[in-house]
Image: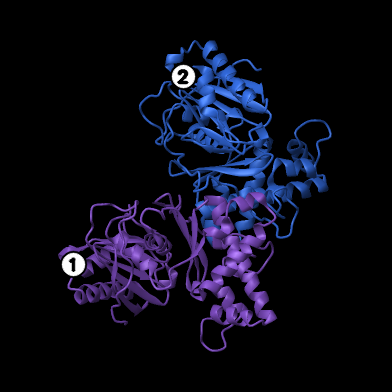
Chain colours: A purple, B blue
Amino acid sequence: MDATIPGGRPAVPAAHLDPRAPGWGVGVDIGGTKVLAVLLDPAGRVVGKHRVATRPGHVGLVDAVTTSVRALTTAHDVPAAALAGVGIGVPGVVDPVSGTVEHAVNVGVDRPFAMADAVADALGARVRVRVENDLNVAVLGAAHTLGPAGERRDLAFLALGTGVAAGLLLDGTLRRGAHRAAGEVGHLTLVPDGLPCGCGQRGCLEQYASGSALDAAWPSPDGRPAPLVLFEAAAAGDPRAVAVRDRFVWAVAGAVRILVLTCDVDAVVVGGGVSGVGEPLLRAVRAELARATAASAFLGSLRLAERVHLAPQHVPVGAVGAALVGRGEIG
Amino acid sequence: MDATIPGGRPAVPAAHLDPRAPGWGVGVDIGGTKVLAVLLDPAGRVVGKHRVATRPGHVGLVDAVTTSVRALTTAHDVPAAALAGVGIGVPGVVDPVSGTVEHAVNVGVDRPFAMADAVADALGARVRVRVENDLNVAVLGAAHTLGPAGERRDLAFLALGTGVAAGLLLDGTLRRGAHRAAGEVGHLTLVPDGLPCGCGQRGCLEQYASGSALDAAWPSPDGRPAPLVLFEAAAAGDPRAVAVRDRFVWAVAGAVRILVLTCDVDAVVVGGGVSGVGEPLLRAVRAELARATAASAFLGSLRLAERVHLAPQHVPVGAVGAALVGRGEIG
């Protein structure tokens, strides 16, 4: 486990947040490999971080959350009574009212699991626990972090990781979808009759714009992240690397176009593992959007390139969003 | 002009409607070829319709609206004082707060036009006039018409006409978009490097799923609507017609997938001129969605085929939605 690390920005509550100052919150972002938690102070600042490896399954997940909460509150002398709540982001289908999780196969949950109740029991009944989908907490955390307060109310968080999917905050409201499937753009067809996808279709966006797609197309020779190695090789002029990078960037730009021309989100924040490439990725995606829309006055008027942003590299937006949910600021 | 025609369904206000019984309303749907108006009684029923040809430009549009309002209220003895308002749907970029219309080139508005004020002046200042985008009024009218009340709060109205675009009602709220461009799916790329589009790009969905695309691919020999002629020829076994129909249906199914996998709308209502084909179109689109998603458990779980519906053939949903806007029921 890492030590607790100070970080974050001075924050005022955004317009979609409940203005009744909500006290301290812990947010826990459960991923396929790690469980990352933050402690948020009453002003919305990240004052501590905590990290453990993911142990899949009900017991392992509950242990990871309770360990994180106890480590952070102990390290910062926050009594249980001062804790407004604990929020958890999970990569699966979540019922935010009951706190039940389904289809979170990456973390070992294959049948409905009443996670909020299980964590509340383990922590002691006085702590309020809320659960939300991982992309929904990420878009909330991105909105909170990228501020200024109240300005970022309308954005998509486009996660490029094992798969490709987006969380949507539309005019300050989470768009979960009528069947909790909003933002599943990874399984839209990018290339008719293209590469086979694990979902059973062919040519899915995910086969071109995900971290997994890059890992397959440009395996890392040295253990460093494949996207970094690829972008470096392309920058150094390797023509094969340039071709792989350009196809990837074209696909990411396609995802941005889908999100903007369908939902007209004000901003698309690119996150997930691949976003660790940083500025070279952002520059390439913006350049591709500018290139692809240059011939079209209509597309040009949408200013796609300007809407794309990178997720902040040193703020765990998922955990921050989970803490906001935990404090009950998001209905 | 047509006579006023009784029509519509007994309606109770839906959940997104203001329950303070709003009185009578006139809704006017301005299209490229015709201006269609309805009179809505206080219970939300269509009690009269009125139709004139579109005369493009500021003067012609204001004349058409005022003529429609006077004809309907006179025919049904509705005094001006009983009229809660007049709503207008316009194919352009609309500021619903100021009632200003821009980029409505199909109806002769190329510079910002304060349409609400102009119509209110022409009608007399006591009548409240509101303006909204044509797809937004269509999705509101579809929600109202397809009821039962309160159930249809989450849908897209997918218009297949000269172009392809959608109106979005998400959990009872119109999604206009951060820059009033939500639902512009017609200019998403369906076929990389495909047919050239008037927008300047290639392979846009609009080049495959619009009425214009069908007119070009299968010109009507006898003045009847091209989509009808094509579907009849395909049903009769003409292999060229089958190929053209199947490609069109594939493209429409693609639009449905984009709307559902991005916004996860509960329903997609297919409207616009092509929807006049009726049940054969609906069956073909549902069959294509079932075929395309059969290989994918994930896509199957989204039940795409079940979400698709036809716009009601005998209710002018755009004008009905405009009347709801006119009565101030939609913020």
Query: Which marked residue is nearer to the observer: mark 2 or mark 1?
Result: 2
Instruction: From the top left corner, tell me how far across and down residue B59 is, in percent.
Output: 63, 23
Amino acid at dot 2: Ala
Instruction: From the top left corner, tell me how far across and down residue B26 is, in percent.
Output: 51, 22
Tell me what residue is drawn at x 37 percent, y 53 percent.
A150
Tell me which chain the residue with mark 2 is part of.
Answer: B
**Does residue A175 appear to the left or right of A219 in the view shown?**
left
Q: Nearer the viewer, residue B269 or B57?
A: B57
Tell me what residue is drawn at x 52 percent, y 75 percent.
A277
Disc 1, SS: loop
Which disc is residue B279 wearing?
none
Tell me which chain the residue with mark 1 is part of.
Answer: A
Q: Nearer the viewer, residue A70 or B130?
A: B130
Q: Which residue is mark 2?
A: B125
Picture quarter with the N terminus of chain B: top right
Residue A37 to residue B139: above or below? below
Question: Does residue B47 appear in this view?
Answer: no
Tell me what residue is drawn at x 65 percent, y 79 percent.
A241
**Does residue A147 appear to the left or right of B72 in the view shown?**
left
Q: Which residue is mark 1?
A: A124
